[in-house]
Amino acid sequence: MSATVAGLRPPPGHVDPRGPRFAAVATSVVLAAVVVTGSVWLLAAQVALFAWTVIVGPGRGPWGRVFRALVRPRLPPPAFYEDAAGPRFAQLVGLIVTGVGLAAAVLEVPHAVLVSAAVALVAATLNGAFGICLGCWMYRVLLRLRRRR
Amino acid sequence: MAERLIVLVVVLAISAGVGLVARWQDGRVRRRGFAPVEAAASSPRIIDVASGAFGAVVVLGTRACITCARTYAVLRDEASAAGGEVQIEHLLLEDRPDLVEALGVRTAPTVVLLDPAGRVVGRHNGGLDEAGARGAVATLIGVAR
């Protein structure tokens, strides 16, 4: 028997935790393609995807919509809903890492695309494969530091 | 192209290594089990244990903590499977900052076991899987009987 939460819709400000993990897997595929091809345009597309998700939140971002439409209907209800703030912050970290890489690539800094995509890929695969969200961990650390002040 | 593929393999190997080490360490925390705590009259009041319950397992977590919510869900399952006589609660440390100092909480989640009088009788720092949750519930039932 598995614990389930009442209702199918997550409460405001919360997401099905499997959604961000699905997004991390999809992001890993895109970033792996960036590493292999070295395409600035593909990196720019990923930067746009990160920015979109940061603005509207992980539940309503592009991968969140795909998850809701195609994946979630095939899954049982989640055992719990997750505060969306952590995954959103993680997307912001991804946006900063790939955004800096994109800016550096535009300024013709050597290996900028490869390095930024590789760094983001480590974080995305850790989340997708192991459920370890480095951005969420950073968010918790920052919250703790802010509370101490 | 070959160089880029090598970079990809190295990146994936780093991720796999970090992920496996993190899982292994998580397992080590779980294997430590519950440290028994001498029930002291001076234990801080955490919750009122429901009348008739064998005790309570309280997950002390934070809003952004995924492992805390997962631990709570697993504990709820195991308590229900064991007959529902152990109370399971999830407290947010943001709402109960007094517990951070009183219990010396350094990890989210920290799981504490309370006897029927509400005194702390066991403690575990970190998340719990099914086996750990079963152990927590069984510990309380054992203490009560």
Image (cartoon, coloured by chain):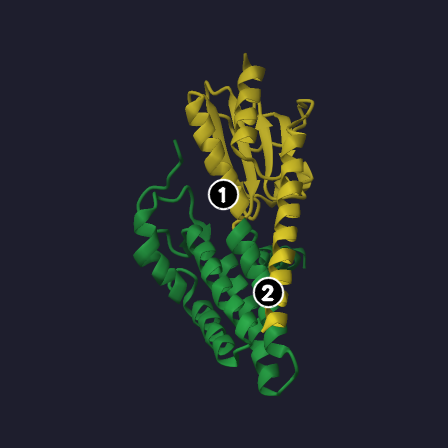
Q: Residue at coordinates 69% horizontally, 22% vertically from top-left? A: B38
Q: Chain of mark 2?
A: B
Farthest residue, direction top: B145
Are there few (<14), some (14-19), or many (20+) residues within 10 Å of tag 2? Answer: many
User: In which quadrant of the rendered image does the C terminus of chain B lie?
Assistant: top right
Give the amino acid type for the residue marked by disc 2 in the picture: Leu
Q: Is residue A113 left or right of residue B73?
A: right
Q: Position of residue B17 (x, y in %)?
A: 65, 51
Q: Which residue is mark 2?
A: B8
In front of the other: A8 or B123 = A8
Secondary element type, mark 1: helix
> Which three-letter amino acid code belongs to the residue tagged 1?
Ala
Query: Do the residues bearing badges 2 and 1 touch, measured as CB atoms within 8 Å?
Result: no
Where residue B48 is drawn, which disc sits there? none
Q: Position of residue A108 (x, y in %)?
A: 62, 87
Q: Tell me the number on the disc at residue B69.
A: 1
Mark 1 closeness class: few <14, some 14–19, many ≥20 residues within 10 Å:
many
Q: Is residue A27 above or below residue A8?
A: below
Image vertical order of residue B55 relative to residue A92, above or below: above
Q: Residue at x 61, y 45 (%)?
A: B97
For this view, does B52 lie left or right of residue A144? left
In the figure, the green chain has which letter?
Answer: A
Across and down, in percent, residue A133 comes to: 56, 55
Residue A54 percent location from the top left of the image: 47, 68
Q: Colour of chain B?
A: yellow
Residue at screen point 49% across, 41% down: B70
